[in-house]
Image (spheres, rainbow, N blue to C red):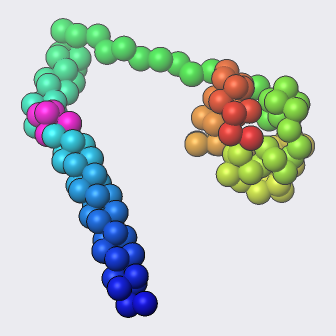
Amino acid sequence: MSGITSVFASSSKKRVNKFQKQAAAERTARKSKMTDRNIGLEILDGIKEIKAFKEGKAHLVTRVLSDPSHPKEIRARLNLSQSAFAGLMGVSVRTVQDWEQDRRKPSGPAKSLLRIAEQHPNVFLKIA
């Protein structure tokens, strides 16, 4: 009986070692991708761009984001209940109700998520 246990244990150890080696290889690959960048040079380039902009020698690209539609309209287009919509947005049902009844306005990340839900509903429906 102990012979069977030891054979099983050794085959399980081989499997674990295989997964450990694979995980180590993936970490190494990620590290090499990260080290291909020269962060210091990127920061210096950014500072040079800011200086040039302040001196009027360069123009920075800016974007003006429009406010998303009313949360109730977005939720209706997605055909989601308040509960499901709140879960996807990462807020409470009460917060969604407050938005829909104009007692509160979405801000920050919630506003960004509403904009995504409005412009790319397939993303929200995919995770729903």
Image quadrant for the N terminus? bottom left
Image quadrant for the C terminus? top right
Q: Residue furthest bottom?
A: 2
Can residue 98 be seen in the rendering of this structure?
no
Q: Quadrant of residue 125?
A: top right
Residue 78 vs residue 62, the one in the foreground:
78
| Residue at image point 72% right, 26% down | 121
| Residue at image point 83% right, 34% down | 75
Residue 7 vs residue 106, the one in the foreground:
7
Q: Position of residue 58 (x, y in %)?
A: 22, 10
Q: Determine if the magenta segment contains residue 82.
A: no
Q: Position of residue 110 (x, y in %)?
A: 64, 42
Left or right for 52, reference 79: left
| Residue at image point 70% right, 25% down | 122
Left or right for 39, reference 61: left
Residue 122 vs residue 114, the one in the foreground:
122
Is 62 rendered above or below residue 30? above
Left or right for 86, reference 39: right
| Residue at image point 88% right, 32% down | 79
Q: Position of residue 115 (x, y in %)?
A: 65, 28
Can residue 52 be seen in the rendering of this structure?
yes
Q: Which residues are magenta?
A: 33-39
Q: Position of residue 102 (x, y in %)?
A: 85, 41
Is 13 rendered above or below residue 59? below
Left or right for 44, reference 123: left
